[in-house]
Image (cartoon, grey):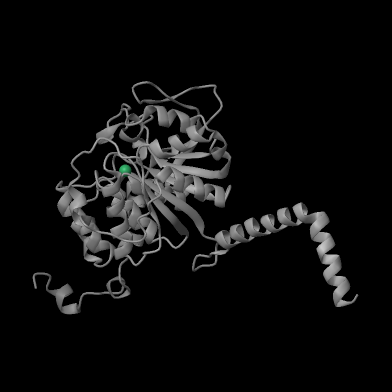
Amino acid sequence: MSKKSIVFFSSQCIRHHGYFLAALVTCCVVALSSLRLVAQRAPHGAAQIPILLDTDIGTDIDDAFALALILRSPELRLLGVTTVSGDTAARARLAAKMLSEAGKRRIPVAAGKPGKPLPIEQTRWAEGFSSPQLLRDNAVDFLDAQFSQYPGKITLVAIGPLTNIGMLLQKDPSAARKIKRIVMMGGSIARGYDDHATPDPEYNIVMDVPAARVVFASGIPILMAPLDVTAMLQLSARNRQRIFDAGAPLGQSLAALYRLWGHPTPILFDPMAVALLLRPNLCETRPLAIRIDPKGYTRVESGEKPNAVVALHTDPQKFFDFYLSRVAPKLQSELHFRPPNSILLNPDK
Ligand SMILES: [Ca+2]
């Protein structure tokens, strides 16, 4: 076929099959972008899990510890962070500064709709911080764009009230089909705060009951870490110091935030949601039908179709072993350290 014939043939094809070609090109672009997303690999060769983090970082201290675990987990690919509840812009600055300190200056952060401002002591750490990674887009539009760009690929890690994802699902119920899974800290089945043996209305649920109801009715697969597997996760002074001693960037950031937080003992509620995503066998889980009652209790409806896989029991020691192995790994020199004979023979020395 001559060059002229090829040009003629091509132009005829485009004329007659323009829509088909345009559709084909669009499919290729979408397929390529999806491939680009899943082709990223963790160092050991397995494909990375693409995630978005929705957080109320800044009130309790556990969100910062959860973000640290994400940043120390090569299996995860953090595509972005959204903030929720109260002063969402201040929370976004906190998340962005923590990312920036860890060298992750390209991970975007989008603030949710601002709510009633509450005093957040930790935000002083990021006062005046600015970065191009702080988006002008609001959290709901950002989530929408990400889930639409990679339909069915992204896991949402939700460690705050469910306002942002609830707003997205109310705006566009079809968005549920684009979300691979929600892994969340929230709810209380048989145990409550302080690890007592009765359930409580849990903070993330009770802060936005309508949003929680929308999420649990959406059909999105949910993996839920309630108080039953989180309320007992008190970070001991020894382990806290080990994390802070790990130094820059994460140990240093966590130490600075801890000092501003101003309480003695963090409880690592939120990091369990991240740990559960990475190590599902850290908890015994069961599919359950969860109904959110008007007071924010997460009630189990027997005989109904399950809408969540719920973690019900855990071994805190195994959780902390895992958490510390990631966020404050022992140096090889410490692992192989043996006290000299003189100390073994003379323990008082
Ligand atoms: Ca939280």
Say which quadrant the N terminus sits in: bottom right
Q: How many marks?
A: 0
Q: Nearer the viewer, residue 193 or 330?
A: 193
* Above-or-below relation of 185 to 294: below
Q: Which residue is located at x 26 percent, y 74 percent?
A: 337
Left or right of 199? Residue 147 is right
Q: Is residue 293 above or below residue 141?
A: above
Q: Position of residue 226 (x, y in %)?
A: 37, 36
Q: Picture quarter containing residue 208?
A: top left
Quadrant holding ligand 1? top left
Q: Note whether residue 281 is visible.
A: no
Judging depth in this view, the residue of 330 and 60 nearest the camera is 60
Is residue 158 visible in this depiction of the protein? yes
Quick one: 312 or 184, which is closer to the camera? 184
Name the residue at the right extreme.
1
Quadrant of the image occupied by residue 211: top left
Residue that appears at 51% across and 60% down: 48
Q: Residue at horizontal 41%, vertical 41%?
A: 184
**To which quarter of the image does residue 130 belong?**
bottom left
- Please state if 275 lies on the left or on the right of 237 as rendered: right
Say whether residue 308 is left or right of residue 247. Answer: right
Instruction: Give coordinates of residue 174: x percent, y percent.
Output: 57, 36
Query: Which residue is at a point 86% across and 66% down the rendered structure image?
Result: 9
Q: Position of residue 136 (x, y in %)?
A: 37, 51
**Quadrant position of the C terminus in the picture:** bottom left
Q: Is residue 347 above or below residue 21?
A: below
Q: Give x and y (percent) for residue 145.
A: 51, 48
